[in-house]
Amino acid sequence: MALKRSKARCTTFAGPASPVFLLLVLATIPVALAQSPRGNELSQYTNAVARVDPMDRLVQLERFAVHAGPGPLRSDALEFVIWEYLRQGKVGHALVWADTLANTDKNNPVAMALLSNDARNGLERGTTKPKRLLAMASHGLDALSQLSRPPGMSEADFVELERRANVMLSDAAGAAELQMKDYVAARIYLHNAAAEQSDSARDVYAMALADLDGPDRDRREGYWCLARAVTLSRGTPEGREIARYARARYVKDGGSTSDWNQFLAAAAPVATSTPIASLDLPQPAPPPPGRSAQRATSARIARPPATVEKPAQPTTMAATRTLGLPAIQRTPPVKPAPSVWSDTETSLPAIVRKRAPVTVGPISLGILVETSLAGRRNRSAVVDSLIDMLRHMSNQDEAFVLTYDHNLVFAEDLTNDPQQLEQALQGIKPQKGAVLDDAITFAAGHLARIARYPNRVLLLISDGRNADSRTSPLQTSAEINAAGVRIYCIGVDVSQSYGRYRLQLLSSSTGGQSRFISDPAQFRKATEGMAQNMGIDFRF
């Protein structure tokens, strides 16, 4: 990553595996890889995947992914790392590495699956555009058929990784189509996901809405799915809203409360175990010709499940065959379905918070600003607040201003001259790009190399995006630990949960803090709070 100087004044700177198991792993590696000129990387990768202990294997694969050059082996290692975290249920960790994989291979379906799954959470909040989500998920589904098994990964693990990616992509595409009211296409995608996984309340609820709206409604399956969603979400805040909406819609559609109670009783015994495809329910009608059919059929349809003997249905299931669906009546439409998952976030790993060290004396401060946040909407709030903070520093304190977009630019190196720092902040020009990991790694190392005081602090202004960085999260963490800096983060318009988690992890693991704002008017108050915690009295 090229580091540029701004036109302002700038200072020059320096820039043990089992033999039998190892043979089995080597046997899975294609001959073409074995003959690659990157023989050393191949040896390192083989050594990593051959580790018997899962945690040891994960650490070695992360290290390999950090240091390997661009190419298939690095992508394989990243897919392996993501799978290991998914298997442990650590979706947040997997999401962070998926972001790195997307920067390495923008067409990788595993990366697109996790990012699409995360972006789906922003649909109802309005932070994700449905057309953009549909494009990403559809592209991932198209690319999924080209996914190959990483060398050393078992066939069973690869099939499960592929299945999970298929579910995430299909769910995301279905949710996008549902948001755009293309109910026929939404049914195709959501049924594709349900064929592989049908115990998610959110997914079953989405399929119910797709069945009950639009042309060729399937009311039998729709109300069955609505009942399943009530059962699966029982005991949660979302569940209470779903239960109220489901009963109201059923009654509004001409049904009775007693019939709805029988639907709920019938759904309860099988809600968490029986796939929808195996229930005695009519299949969705094929989509009519046109945009919906063309787009839906382009999706990668899940492989048919293995043939199993259909279990005997409980008596309550038999009762549902005689339940009459509500008669079609000309009644006012029920109010729109509640957005019960509008605040849902991807499950992220717990963050271990490091206690802030006792800091006294002068401060060596690095101010790291993502230039896109100094655009017209945020500029006066960001620049003016930072300038006021610098004016409250003591005569001994020193600071530098480093900006980042697709490059790193030193607006001003370490100095205790507030006028030069003020000019540097005023000269920031917005650019595209966000090499966050590269910027953090360099800024922390720079403070460690030239700061005069042990009280070293980095203030980061970012929206959490990390695009085109050459530095991995693991390498960034190692550099920060070596530098001994505290990191304070102000997140501005952070739309994705992995971006929020990235900033929270940077701050909490170093003894700093993070704050998130969505309005420029909130920036000054956030800066005042950060300054106070750093030891700068910015109250007056």
Image (cartoon, rainbow, N blue to C red):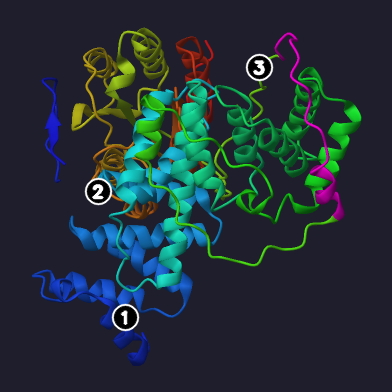
Provide the residue designation for mark 3: 336
Q: Which residue is drawn at 80% across and 48% down?
A: 268
Q: Which residue is drawn at 75% across and 53% down?
A: 270
Nearest the eye: 458 or 498: 498
Report the span colored magenta: 315-334
Left-right relation of 244 to 193: right
| Residue 376 in view, yes or no | yes
Left-right relation of 481 to 73: right
Q: Residue at x 37, y 63 (%)?
A: 80
| Earlier residue among tags 1 and 3 | 1
Q: In the rendered structure, find residue 104 and report the number of the disc placed on it.
A: 2
Left-right relation of 164 to 146: right
Disc 1 is placed on an element classified as: helix
Residue at the limit of the structure toward the right, as seen here: 258
Near mark 2 (Cα within 10 A), the count class, few <14, some 14-19 or many ≥20, is many
Q: Distance between the residues labelled 2 and 3?
A: 41 Å
Q: In the rendered structure, find residue 404 and report the number of the disc placed on it.
A: none
Left-right relation of 320 to 348: right
What's under tag 2, amino acid-wise? Thr
Provide the residue designation for mark 1: 25
| Earlier residue among tags 2 and 3 | 2
Q: How far apart are marks 2 and 1 (CA)?
A: 25 Å
| Residue 118 in view, yes or no | no
What's under tag 1, amino acid-wise? Val
